[in-house]
Image (cartoon, rainbow, N blue to C red):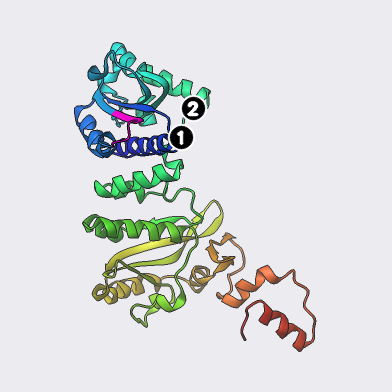
């Protein structure tokens, strides 16, 4: 379904360009799998039915396209497996039919790891495409990435996105770790809009955005976890619960985001009590490292310390925020100093 989503986005871009330039474009989409032909056909049928005479689209199986040509051809190879099995397209004659139908432009959609696993014509094509700078990761394009995200959510494949190597998180400022409770809770969420809202929030958090202070406290708790716990509202019904945690890696301590659960407000006290037990085992130094906060403009950035370094001082927002101002030259007299800080938006 990811290939269906990407094929649809390519068609949408071609249609928009055809309308803008008033040039005729004939698009053909080929797939060896009948179910894929049907799925793509359903996704792009609005373009097929459009009254615009300059744009036409046809979706067929490989055999159905034999002898035909179009300006642009999109091939969906479908297969995605660890064994490199490409199915129908391992046959050179049928692969030749699929790959020679384009007059001007050919797009091949597929899973790289599958296509290059075995010595097939598709492996040669991937290697050649890379050689000529014609190989692209679909998720690096914003419109494709959004379409892929929607497709994965709609087909209950969110676990692919909740992976540190996913396009959603791999380039983010913060590393994100998910508890088993959160993953189980997400697997039970049936509302697609709620899933999309959770993903958007996670992406924003991983890139350093934080909710205004007055909106954070949805319930009040007096245990140890209250020092770290963050609660953000989702879709008016659920709450995303997370903290900053510390990871040891390559001789450094790193701040990471730990997402504990997504739950209704009524379950929050129970979750907080469980986390109290966990955080009671944290040393004072580890707690201070978790609470330490540094801003880069309006975004919170993760901190790191060499293992064995002096203990981290208790987090102080003013102290952290004042570091970027260290290079400013302030006069010693109190009147001059207070005036300077007021002009920067500070309040005593």
Tell me: 338 left or right of 72.
right
Does residue 265 appear to the left or right of 341 in the view shown?
A: left
**Residue 10 sits above or below residue 65 on the image:** below
Element marked by disc 1:
helix
Q: Is residue 27 left or right of residue 249?
A: left
* 67 is within the stretch colored magenta: no
Q: What residue is at 29 percent from the left and 74 percent from the top?
A: 268
At mark 2, the secondary structure is loop
Q: Residue at x 72, y 70 (%)?
A: 326
Q: Is residue 97 above or below residue 245?
A: above
Q: Is residue 19 visible?
A: yes
Label 1 to label 2, Cα distance in Å?
25 Å
Front-most of residues 10 and 280? 10
Quadrant housing residue 96: top left
Q: Quadrant of residue 244?
A: bottom left
Crowding around mark 2 (Cα neighbors within 10 Å: few <14, some 14 to 19, many 20+) is few
Please report the bounds of the magenta region as a residue range: 51-57
**Residue 123 sits above or below residue 323 on the image:** above
| Mark with earlier residue (1, 2) | 1
Q: Position of residue 18 (x, y in %)?
A: 41, 34
Q: Which residue is mark 2?
A: 134
The answer to whether one can see residue 119 in this image is no
Image location (x, y in percent) of residue 15: 37, 36
Circle 1 residue: 21
- Residue 157 image point, x, y percent: 27, 46
């Amino acid at each position: 379904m990811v290939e269906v989503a990407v094929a649809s986005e390519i068609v949408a871009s071609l249609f928009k360009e055809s309308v803008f330039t008033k040039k005729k474009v004939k698009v053909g989409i080929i797939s060896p799998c009948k179910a894929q032909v049907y799925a793509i056909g359903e996704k792009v049928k609005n373009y097929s039915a459009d009254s615009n005479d300059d744009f036409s689209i046809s979706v067929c199986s490989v055999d159905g396209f034999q002898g035909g040509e179009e300006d642009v051809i999109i091939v969906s190879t479908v297969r995605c497996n660890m064994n490199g099995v490409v199915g129908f397209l391992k046959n050179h004659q049928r692969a030749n039919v699929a790959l020679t139908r384009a007059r001007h432009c050919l797009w091949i959609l597929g899973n790289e790891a599958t296509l290059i696993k075995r010595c097939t014509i598709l492996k040669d094509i991937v290697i050649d495409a890379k050689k000529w700078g014609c190989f692209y990761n679909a998720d690096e394009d914003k419109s494709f990435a959004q379409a892929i995200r929607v497709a994965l959510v709609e087909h209950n494949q969110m676990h692919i996105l909740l992976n540190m190597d996913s396009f959603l998180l791999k380039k983010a400022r913060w590393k994100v770790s998910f508890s088993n409770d959160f993953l189980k809770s997400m697997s039970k969420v049936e509302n697609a809009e709620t899933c999309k809202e959770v993903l958007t929030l996670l992406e924003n958090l991983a890139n350093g955005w934080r909710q205004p202070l007055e909106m954070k406290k949805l319930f009040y708790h007096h245990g140890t976890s209250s020092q770290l716990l963050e609660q953000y509202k989702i879709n008016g019904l659920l709450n995303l619960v997370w903290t900053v945690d510390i990871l040891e890696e390559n001789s450094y301590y790193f701040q990471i985001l730990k997402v504990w659960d997504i739950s209704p407000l009524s379950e929050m006290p129970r979750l907080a009590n469980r986390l109290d037990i966990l955080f009671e085992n944290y040393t004072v130094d580890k707690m201070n490292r978790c609470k330490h906060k540094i801003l880069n403009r309006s975004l919170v950035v993760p901190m790191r310390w060499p293992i064995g370094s002096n203990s981290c001082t208790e987090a102080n927002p003013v102290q952290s925020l004042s570091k970027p101002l260290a290079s400013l030259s302030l006069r010693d007299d109190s009147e001059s100093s207070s005036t300077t800080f007021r002009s920067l938006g500070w309040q005593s």
